[in-house]
Structure formats: C-alpha cells, structure tokens
Image (tube, coloured by chain):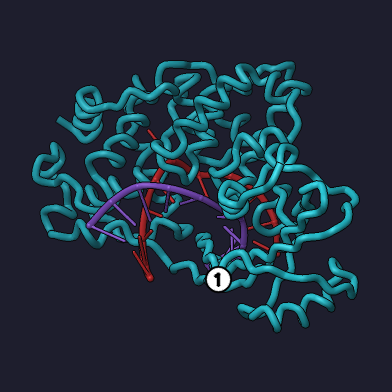
Chain colours: A cyan, B purple, C red
DNA sequence: AAGTCGGGGCA
DNA sequence: TGCCCAGACTT
C-alpha cells in the first residue's frame, strides 16, 4: 500500500466527528477554515458553532457590523481574521450575489484567504484536486520523507506544496486532504508521536533514522518585545468609565480598551503620578490613583510581553462620553481587558 | 526574506 | 519556558 492509501485508511478508522466535515456548504467551510488558522480544533470549535448559529448565511454576516463580528471573535486572537472575514462576506454578498467562488484560482483572491485556505475550501466544498499544506502536513511529510528543508523557507514552502500535490489522491482529494491533516494532528503529533503503532513506520525515514524529534526544521524564533501598559480605569459618580478604540495598525486593531499610557518601564505610583501628568489623556490634570494589581499582570503574546498595571481613578463628578458596565460588555476587547472586567467589581 | 499578528495547550 | 496550533499579510 502506498502513502496515500495508508493515510486514507487510517483516517477512516480514526477521524474525529467535526461539524465542518459534515457539510459541503462553502460558506460554512470558509468560516471553519478562517477560524482554524493557527488555532487548535479544540479552541476554535465553540467559535465555529457560535458563528454558524448567529450568521447562518453569508448575507447574515455581511449585514452585521464589524464591531459585532469582533465581539463574537473576542478571545480567539489574530483579529485581522475577523476583520477580513467581515470584509469578504460583504464582498461575496454584494458583489457576487452571495455566490461563493468555486475554484482555487478565484478563492485565493479573497482577502484573508491564502494558499492553504483556498485549497481547503476548493477541495472540501468543490472536490477540486488541490493539496493543502498546513503545519500538520509539513510535519508528516518532512518526517516520512526525511526532508530537512526549513518549512518556512521559500524553498520549503514550494517544495512541500509540490510534494503534497504529487501525493494527493486525485479521485478523492477532499478525503486525502482531511486525512493527512488529521493524521498529523492525532498520530504524527509534534511531541511524543505514536510511532510505535504508526502504519507508516516501515517507510518513515525519520523513524528509521531516529530523527523524529529533529523534524520538521523551522527557521528563526520570534524575539519577544517587552512593553509596559498603564490602563486608566475611571469611575465617575454614575459608576461609568471611559473606553477608547485602538485604531492604529499594531495589536488589537479596532478593539476597545481603557485609556492607555505606555511607559518604558514598570512604574511605581510616585513615578506614575509624575509621568502621567505629561500624558495627553490627562491634559496636565492630576488624579488620585489606586493601583488595582500589586504585581504587573504579564499578558503574553507570541512576540510581545505586556507588563500591565490597572490604575483605578474614582471621581466625584460625571464624565462625558462615559459608558456604563452594561454598555461596556458590548464592546469587543482584548482578552487582557476582558479578564480585568470580569474580575473587577463595577458597581451598577 | 523577515517581521507582525493572539491566545491557549503541552511537555 | 519554549514551541506549536487546519496561516496570511505587510514591510
């Protein structure tokens, strides 16, 4: 039996029961694939169920506004996926009359859809013979064939795609694509793969040469930048607070947060009182700061560590443009802010 | 080609 | 802690 037959047989016996495998609706498949980018099935599944329920058709998603989409996406990360999802839904609804493009060539043109996602949708929804190459596929192929070309090098990206294209079962491309990814996720795992019971063991170069732990090869590691966030949590006489939208390019674009003063290092209360005066937000005014968290809350992103302090500011008067707790709950916020909101006692 | 974009799971 | 996850986009 060849590689593809073994993979497909393994899949038939071990596949998980996942909702996006029961449909050929390209809209639902597209939703699932965007949600699952760089996201484990376990983490993405509840989001997929929410999105299908709240937005059953592409028109429902297109008719929503971005803020509601981001709110539903809250906690999943990589928020550009949600913004592009909404943008593309509007494009399909308004420009294509709701007709999802049905070839790899056209699907890959959609914003937020790259080579992997286009192949996934084209094969799953339209049975096009186009091979998916995700993190699972890189791992399975690099190990089985003993290929040490870095998977994130230009040569590696091109080479593994070509190899997957050679291997795909042309009579059942969707099943092959599902099978090789599922095999990578469950059997040929990153750590402690089940080589002892693996049906590919005999011909697996990495297993036969004891290189399982050395493959796949990946270039460079992300260097982490430390940042120091000081959030101003105002509470006026009506228990209302201030929020601002992150409109600039970096992290959390179009999500909401409390007014933020970023500093070069972690500041004591004395240092912060001095430092904050020069901030535009406070406009030279001074306030009575009450530090919510003694130790910095360190929120870790893949490439930034956010050392965070929440400063509580109780006010006698009423703030303009302030929001109540019930209003606050409607804003999409980063997980860091959401965590604070759920723990802090807003009096309403 | 390298950098950026989240949050959670795992050894 | 460091690496990975049904990657894509920007610089």
Q: Is residue A77 above or below residue A306?
A: above
Tell me what residue is drawn at x 42 percent, y 37 percent.
Answer: A132
Q: How many marks?
A: 1
Q: Position of residue A92 (x, y in %)?
A: 70, 24
Disc 1 element: loop
Residue located 12% across and 44% down the image: A201
Q: Quadrant of residue A19?
A: top left
The residue that appears at 24% across and 44% down in the rendered structure is A188
Determine the residue positioned at 89% across, 75% down: A284
Q: Is residue A258 left or right of residue A123?
A: right
Is the residue A300 above or below the residue A37 in the image? Answer: below
**Looking at the picture, how far across and down is residue A228, in whole percent?**
63, 72
Disc 1 crowd, CA 10 A, few/some/many (<14, 14-19, 20+)? few
Q: Position of residue A114 (x, y in %)?
A: 56, 41
Q: Quadrant of residue A43?
A: top left
Camera-nearest residue between C7 and A248: A248
Q: Is residue A155 left or right of residue A199?
A: right
Residue A8 vertical position relative to residue C3 in the rendered view, above or below: above
Q: Position of residue A64 (x, y in %)?
A: 73, 26
- Does residue A78 appear in the picture of this structure? no
Between A95 and A247, the one nearer to me in the picture: A247
The residue beneath circle 1 is: A294
Residue A60 can be seen, yes or no: yes
Read off the chain for label 1. A
Question: If the image is split into quadrants, where does the N terminus of chain A sit?
Answer: top left
Q: Is residue A51 above or below residue A302?
A: above
Quadrant the C terminus of chain A occupies: top right
**Along the viewing direction, whichever of A112 and A119 lies nearer the viewer:** A112
């Amino acid at each position: 039996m060849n590689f593809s037959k073994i993979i497909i047989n393994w899949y038939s016996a071990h596949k998980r029961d996942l909702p996006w495998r029961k449909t050929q609706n390209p809209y639902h498949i597209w939703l699932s694939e965007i949600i699952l980018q760089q996201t484990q099935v376990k983490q993405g599944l509840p989001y997929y169920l929410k999105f299908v329920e709240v937005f059953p058709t592409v028109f429902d998603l297109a008719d929503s506004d971005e803020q509601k989409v981001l709110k539903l996406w809250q906690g999943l990360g990589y928020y550009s996926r949600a913004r592009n999802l909404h943008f593309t839904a509007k494009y399909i609804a308004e420009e294509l009359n709701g007709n999802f493009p049905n070839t790899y060539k056209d699907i890959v043109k959609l914003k937020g859809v790259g080579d992997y996602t286009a192949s996934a949708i084209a094969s799953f929804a339209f049975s096009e013979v186009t091979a998916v190459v995700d993190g699972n596929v890189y791992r399975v192929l690099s190990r089985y064939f003993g290929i040490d070309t870095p998977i994130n090098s230009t040569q590696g990206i091109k080479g593994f795609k070509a190899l997957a294209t050679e291997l795909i079962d042309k009579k059942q491309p969707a099943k092959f694509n599902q099978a090789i990814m599922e095999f990578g996720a469950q059997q040929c795992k990153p750590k402690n793969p089940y080589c002892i019971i693996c049906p590919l063991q005999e011909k697996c170069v990495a297993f036969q040469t004891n290189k399982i732990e050395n493959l796949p090869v990946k270039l460079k590691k992300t260097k982490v930048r430390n940042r120091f966030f000081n959030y101003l949590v105002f509470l006026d006489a009506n228990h209302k607070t201030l929020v601002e939208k992150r409109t600039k390019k970096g992290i959390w674009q179009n999500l909401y947060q409390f007014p933020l003063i970023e500093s070069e290092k972690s500041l004591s209360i004395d240092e912060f009182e001095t430092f904050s005066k020069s901030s535009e937000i406070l406009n030279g005014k001074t306030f009575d700061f009450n530090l919510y968290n003694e130790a910095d809350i360190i929120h870790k992103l893949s490439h930034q560590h956010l050392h965070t302090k929440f400063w509580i500011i109780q006010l006698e008067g009423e703030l303009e443009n302030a929001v109540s707790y019930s209003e606050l709950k409607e804003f999409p916020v980063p997980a860091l802010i959401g965590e604070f909101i759920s723990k802090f006692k807003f009096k309403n």
